[in-house]
Amino acid sequence: MSQRPEEERLELADELAREAGELLLGFQSQGFEISKKGRVNLVTEADIAAEQFIVEGIRESFPEDAILAEEGGAEGGGASFKWVIDPLDGTTNYAHGYPCFCVSIGIELEGRVVAGVVYDPNRADCFMALRGDGAELNGRRIQVSRQDAVVDSLLCTGFSYGDEEIARNLELFNRVMLKARSVRRDGSAALDLCYVACGRFDGFWELSLHPWDVAAGSLIVEEAGGWVSRFDGGPVSIYDRECLATNGRIHGVLAELLLGL
């Protein structure tokens, strides 16, 4: 039986994410240049090299596909398939030697994410999902947790680089922290979403996100049985700036906390 087009692309995404992850580790061991694209927002030569490697791999196999990448922007608009790439999610962690970063590749078909890979090279963890086929971690099926009380939940959030967004999320952090078992802030939205998918976290929220932050991870959560929405519980797109992802059981209560209800 022949593969679906999205399956072929998922296989390539898996290969490219793993190889890009090894490239990132290589840069870490050899040293790399760091520059700024904002007051505190960093970009390294490793980000750029990993993205170039991924884009070249896509162009070689699927030259007609569109690409949206964090560092290089958009190209090839109008194609049915679009690759949404974060070559290094967690750049600040990476630059400081904190081992929490990943490569994230999501694949859209006609505007809907149908496949995604998130690869953590430090743990050799590869999260993967194909729409309708479930989610996997290193080839084994994963599911969200069954925790049904926020007070017993381990949650996660992330902070953007904008002062107003930081101030707003500090309010949300304080509000949720008083109701949950604990809240983490790891610095990689893609990994945070995958941790919800495999039950390491029970829920995650963040403001001021970009498509490449969530394209793969949000699908992985959904295919693991979780829920992904806006803070108000409505349908969310990867092009929205906010995201709430949970195991589904605590979704309504956590949404009410974030909305201040």
Image (cartoon, rainbow, N blue to C red):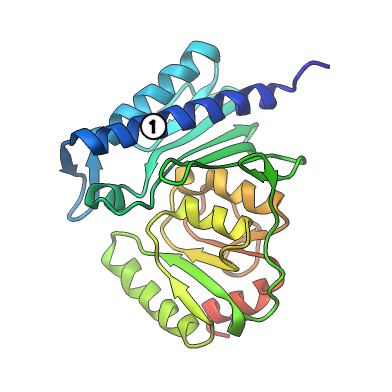
Q: Where is residue 23 in the image (x, y as percent from the top left)?
A: 34, 30
Q: In which quarter of the image is residue 52?
A: top left
Q: Where is residue 98 in the image (x, y as percent from the top left)?
A: 30, 54
Residue 239 against residue 174 in the figure, above or below = above
Question: Would residue 125 be visible to someone looking at this image?
Answer: yes
Residue 224 against residue 256 in the figure, above or below = above
Residue closer to the observer: 92 or 109: 92
Q: Is mark 1 on a helix, strand or loop?
A: helix
**Which three-letter amino acid code belongs to the residue tagged 1?**
Glu
Q: How many marks?
A: 1
Which quadrant of the figure contains the C terminus?
A: bottom right
Residue closer to the observer: 170 or 29: 29
Residue 30 against residue 146 in the figure, above or below = above
Which quadrant of the figure contains the N terminus?
A: top right
Residue 109 against residue 148 in the figure, above or below = above
Does residue 150 appear left or right of residue 31 in this picture? right
**Measuring 49% from the left and 19% from the top, which residue is drawn there?**
58
Q: Position of residue 151 (x, y in %)?
A: 59, 85
Kindly identify which residue carries mark 1. Answer: 22
Q: In which quarter of the image is residue 246?
A: bottom right
